[in-house]
Amino acid sequence: MSTFVMMSTAVALSMDAFAVAASCGISNKAKTFGIQGKIALFFGIFQGLMPILGYFLASAFADRIRAIDHWIAFGLLGFIGVRMILESREEDRCGTGRLSNRYLLTLAIATSIDAMASGIGFAFLDINIWLVAGIIALTTFIISFIGARFGHNLGHKFQAGSEIFGGTVLILIGGKILLEGLAII
């Protein structure tokens, strides 16, 4: 996996976290630097851990499904991408109330399910999962912090646009994996 593809994947997977962090900023829940950092830390950690979990779950079965791995990766990334695009139409997902650790944990898990599914797809590629997961975690931390920090300046249109962009990138990466697996490119 090239550096460009790793970075594109990291940015794409961080778009849900960005959108939720921005929603928290828009709703004035992320008022302080500390709260913004806390949001970014929760999202970054989970976005980094979930691909590792998906990778090792899928690796246990890799020998049995190697012949169809490109279809699996394409299906998962395509599904995730389409889901992200469809979710871009949803209303504010930050909800009401304060940002407790329990609440942030729920948001972090919900926004990182896509990353776990991507980890399943990564199991069929010749990659260093630790490097990819680290890049995803760091990218998500930075993007989530930016989202929370400047969320009050962002409109709902940009929130939806970020998820559409992220979903489109995942679909394109899935298509590239499929075309490579079919030896078309």
Image (cartoon, rainbow, N blue to C red):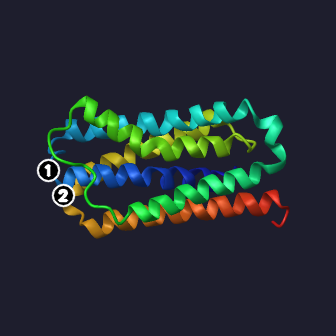
Residue 51 placement (x, y as % from top left):
56, 38
Residue 29 placement (x, y as % from top left):
16, 45
Q: Earlier in the sequence, mark 2 or mark 1?
A: 1
Above or below: residue 123 compared with residue 180 = above
Comparing 15 with 3, the one in front is 15
Indicate left or right for 65 with 85 as reference.
Answer: right
Q: Secondary structure at mark 2?
A: helix
Kind of residue at badge 1: Asn
Q: Point out which mark residue 152 bears.
A: 2
Q: Quadrant of residue 52?
A: top right
Residue drawn at (65%, 30%), measured in percent from left and top? 56
Residue 114 placement (x, y as % from top left):
51, 47
Indicate left or right for 78 with 89 as reference.
Answer: right
Residue drawn at (20%, 40%), measured in percent from left and top? 33
Kind of residue at badge 2: His
Residue 170 placement (x, y as % from top left):
57, 59
Query: How many residues crowd mark 2 within 10 Å: few (<14), some (14–19), many (20+)?
Result: some
Q: Secondary structure at mark 1?
A: loop
Residue drawn at (18%, 58%), measured in percent from left and top? 152
CA–CA distance in space, label 2 to label 1: 7 Å
